[in-house]
Amino acid sequence: MMSKIDVLIVPSLRSSAVKAARILADSGYDVIFLNLPTNLQSLISEYTSGSISLQELISRIGSMRLIPESISSWLYLNEPLLRILRRASKPIKAYCYVDVDYYHMLIEAAVRIARLTYKANVTGRIDVNEWIRVIEGHIRSETMGQEAEFISLKARGYSICITGLSGWKIARILRGFGHEVKVKSAERLYMFRPLEILETLMETGNLTHRVAEELIREHVRFVRDYVLTSESLDKAYYSWINARKRLVDLLCQINQSERPINSSISRCY
């Protein structure tokens, strides 16, 4: 059965999650698909039905070790949307749709990137190929298709799917299933962080060794100069974009004649 589905792209910032929560509260959706691992489904259902409080939800997730990252980090990004689920103007069905193994893979990749970032800060040296292997390891294709199929089967009436920056890809798959899909963004304007740009260029086959190294070094500076000296990721991000504009110039100067280092995934979406 064809449904109307809004795919809402939400960058990994708490302020973006707050904006997404406002959109959710004002739009009267029947179903929400959360980009949370499916092993949280039973607890999320208990929470949305009113059987447990938000504090009980958090406590159980922690005690059952259902997520690989710290509860505080997880809650920082997800609390705004969780709170709005209990304040919606009408009952809303919520589904967690992210593959558990893939979710763990993402966190593992984040840990490895953190180690590489520390190493680069200490030594000043960057092994571009090593960074590429880590990032390429969590770029998904088959998993996204499975998640889109789940969303397609569960969508009813007017649905919304919360996604990360690659939401336009899952939207394309959902359209293939016959749904009426619109892609929206929680942010009116969002400047991609260095590794987000790197991953996008990698997926489209437009990443060169030179640009990869520049983006990695920019990421290392972002972590050293902003993340480690700020109270939160949001403050680090907004301080960074206010101080640095040279990434835009860098991307405008990409030498198209340079050979992409990742031609094996050179697809255009």
Image: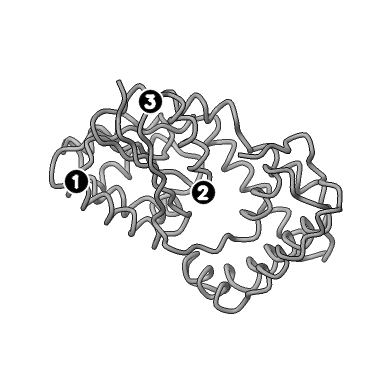
Q: Which residue is mark 1?
A: 86
Under mark 1, the amino acid is Arg
- Tell me how the rendering is colored: one colour
Task: Kindly report the distance in space between the C-alpha atoms of the residues bearing marks 1 and 3.
Answer: 24 Å
Instruction: Identify the secondary structure beneath mark 1.
Output: loop
Q: Earlier in the sequence, mark 1 or mark 3?
A: 1
Q: Which residue is mark 3?
A: 152
Q: Earlier in the sequence, mark 2 or mark 3?
A: 3
The residue at 82%/66% (across/down) is 124
**235 and 173: which is toward the camera:** 173
Under mark 3, the amino acid is Ser
Against 213, residue 135 (above or below) is above
The residue at 45%/37% (across/down) is 171
The residue at 34%/30% (across/down) is 41
Give left or right: position of 55 versus 123: left
Against 227, residue 183 (above or below) is above
**Label 1 vs label 3, nearer the camera:** 3
Under mark 2, the amino acid is Leu
Q: Which residue is mark 2?
A: 165
